[in-house]
Amino acid sequence: MANKLPKFPKFIEGMTLNFKEVDESDAEFIFELRTDPELNEHISTVSGNIKDQIEFIKKYKEKPDEYYVVFQDKKGKPYGLGRMYNITNERFTPGSWIMKKSAPPIFSIESVLLMYDFAFKTLSLKYADIDVRKENKTVIAFHQRFGAEYVKEDELHIYMVLTRETYFKARQRYQNFLKD
């Protein structure tokens, strides 16, 4: 993905949810989710107001190596967010994943599967470079169940890599969460 990423599809359809690229109309939802102290414990915090979030979305749209998405139910009600950034010809970093507490439990796993499918199938990327805050034990364990391998750590984060091949082997265990 040397210079500019392909245009994001109108939406990507899953079994129980869809995801779409954020736009300015999502600013209020994003702001509410990102400022919830229970939900933003392991991701960078947001300050300011909804107008600041709109400006952030405008600036995001200019980034050549990133997708910022909203996960929504089949009726279009938003439940979560995710990002794919530092996208190159072979690699990406998944992150900033956050889901409302009221989301059906299936949304969590399905949203991750949809994002990885988009990266590994649609974009043909080979590696997910994962960094997780050390205290976020459930997310570390989740990525390990998918076969992500430990690379290194620093004071705050554990760094792992998930290959396309490893993902597709693990994906077979989650077929009941997928549409195809």
Image: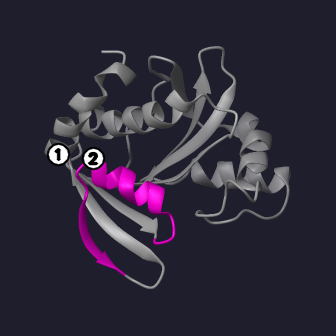
Front disc: 2 or 1: 2
Disc 2 is placed on an element classified as loop
Q: Which mark is residue 31?
A: none
Q: Nearer the viewer, residue 60 or 35?
A: 35
Judge left or right: residue 173 versus residue 165: right
| Quadrant in the picture for residue 169 | top left
Is the C-beta separation of discs 2 and 1 under 8 Å?
A: yes
Q: Find residue 97 and report its horizontal and vertical position in percent.
A: 53, 49
Q: Is residue 90 left or right of residue 33?
A: left
Q: Secondary structure at mark 1?
A: helix
Is residue 113 shown left or right of residue 67?
A: left
On screen, residue 39 above or below 160? above
The disc, 2 or 1, on the residue closer to the chain's N-terminal end is 2
> What range is drawn magenta here?
134-153
Q: How is the image coloured?
A: one colour
Query: Would you say residue 135 sits in the magenta stretch?
Result: yes
Q: CA distance from mark 2 to mark 1?
A: 7 Å
Q: Does the rendering let one see residue 90? A: no
The residue that mark 2 highlights is 146
Task: Kindly identify which residue carries mark 1.
Answer: 166
Q: x%, y% of residue 26?
A: 72, 37
The residue drawn where x is 63% and y is 55% is 59
In the image, what residue occupies the spot 50% across and 49% down? 83
